[in-house]
Structures are given as C-alpha cells and as structure tokens.
C-alpha cells in the first residue's frame, strides 16, 4: 500500500473539508514539525486531545465542517476526522477517510457509522488512525505508524469495517450530519450510513490489511 496516492487525497475538497480556512491554516502552521511524520503526529495529537468528543463531554452542539469543529471545539468522531484531514491537507500531507459500522452501545443497540482517518507517509504508505479522543474508558488511541491503534474493534454481529480509504467524506453521512438538531437527537437516531455507490480509483483506494487494531 505504498503507491503514491492521487491528487484527490491532497486537495479533494468541498464546503466540509475547508482546509483553506484562515483559522485552519493558522493552526496548521503552529503544528508544523521537522518532517511530515512529525507534523502528522502533531495534528493528530491536537485534534484527539483538544477537540472534545461530543458524547463523552455531554455537549449538544453538532459540528460537521472542519472550520466549525475548530471554532466550536467539539465534534463526533466523524467531525473530528474532518478537522484532522483538513489540517493534514493544509500541509499537503495525503489523507482520507475510513469508516466502521458499529453498535452504538453494546451488541443489541442500533448501529452507527464511526469515522476515522488514514494518512499516507513516505516509507510507511497508508496508516490508519483514530482521533476520536481517549476520554472514554478502554480507549487508548495513539499515532504510531507501523502499529494500528483504532478506538474500536468490530466484534458484535452486524459490525464491520468498510475496506477503503475515501478522498472525500461520504455524501449520505454529511447530509445526515447536517440534519441533526443536537447530540440528543443523534443518540435517539444514530446515523447508519452507506458508502457512495460509485467512486473512481482516484477518489477511493482499497485497504487490504495492515496491523490489526488493538481494540
């Protein structure tokens, strides 16, 4: 998985991943490291630790646009992924979106779409990581290229990973996020989205392996 990704993973953008926003560019500059891997880690750690996970911290605001996530300071896993990819792309670091289908709260609960990210690093290739935040007991996500530390393993019936890395967020997921009134609304009606029916090879790459998630 070390083939250089297409330009779409550097600049594919719409109103959601608005990595040219002045506040995102200013933060990205502050997080610059000595090399792309250091920079990628700095951005990951900042989003993981400084943007609160809405459910963990009982926040009601719903954010989706990368700039809104930064401005409000909170977001669901999906929203935090939008901001992290925006920061990486501000540094011209190839990056994209990954998704799991998870039970929201145990094996018998409704399903939801969990979003995390992948970054392409020279010498490593695609590396998947999860910046949802370590504020929930049992989760310890770190940025350790070569060893995957995802927040969740798919263990319950009906759960699975979608084996791809997308250059853009799923349209159905973004539309559903924008319709949410607040986080209480989300908890009553979790989003269980589907991947877009078609993407060309420049906008989605298959992910066929890598280190096993730690859970």
Image (cartoon, rainbow, N blue to C red):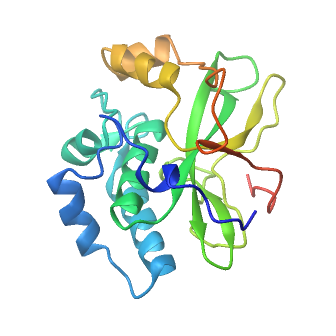
Percent position (x, y) of residue 192?
60, 18
Quarter of the rendering containing residue 15:
top left
At 53% from the left and 18% from the top, the residue drawn is 191
Furthest toward the bottom, the residue is 34
Q: Is the N terminus in the top left, top right, bottom left or bottom right quadrant?
A: bottom right
Percent position (x, y) of residue 145?
65, 72
Q: In the image, is residue 60 above or below residue 67?
A: above
Q: In the image, is residue 209 above or below residue 115?
A: below
Percent position (x, y) of residue 81?
46, 46
At 59% from the left and 35% from the top, the residue drawn is 114
Percent position (x, y) of residue 134?
51, 55
Q: On the rendered structure, is 212 left or right of 106?
A: right
Q: Does the rendering let one see residue 146?
A: yes
Q: In the image, is residue 28 above or below residue 37?
A: above
Pick the front one: 103 or 169: 169
Q: On the rendered structure, is 170 left or right of 206?
A: left
Q: Does the rendering let one see residue 131?
A: no
Pick the front one: 30 or 215: 30
Q: On the rendered structure, is 168 left or right of 155?
A: left
**How many marks can you see?**
0
At 70% from the left and 42% from the top, the residue drawn is 164
Q: In the image, is residue 16 above or below residue 20?
A: above
At 24% from the left and 44% from the top, the residue drawn is 67
């Amino acid at each position: 998985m070390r083939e250089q990704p297409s330009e779409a993973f550097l600049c594919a953008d719409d109103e959601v991943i608005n990595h040219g926003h002045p506040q995102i560019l200013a933060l990205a500059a502050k997080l610059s490291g000595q090399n792309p891997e250091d920079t990628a880690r700095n951005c990951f750690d900042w989003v993981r630790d400084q943007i609160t996970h809405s459910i963990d911290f009982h926040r009601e605001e719903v954010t989706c646009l990368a700039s809104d996530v930064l401005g409000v300071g909170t977001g669901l896993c999906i929203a935090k992924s939008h901001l992290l990819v925006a920061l990486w792309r501000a540094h011209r670091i190839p990056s994209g979106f990954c998704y799991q289908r998870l039970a929201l709260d145990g094996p018998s609960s409704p399903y939801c779409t969990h979003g995390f990210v992948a970054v392409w690093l020279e010498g490593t290739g695609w590396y998947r990581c999860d910046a949802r935040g370590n504020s929930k007991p049992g989760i310890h996500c770190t940025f350790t290229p070569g060893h995957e530390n995802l927040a969740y393993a798919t263990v319950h019936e009906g759960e699975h990973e979608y084996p791809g890395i997308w250059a853009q967020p799923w349209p159905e997921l973004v539309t559903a996020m924008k319709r949410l009134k607040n986080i209480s609304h989300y908890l009553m009606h979790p989003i269980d989205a589907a991947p877009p029916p078609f993407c060309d090879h420049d906008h989605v790459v298959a992910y066929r392996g890598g280190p096993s998630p730690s859970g």
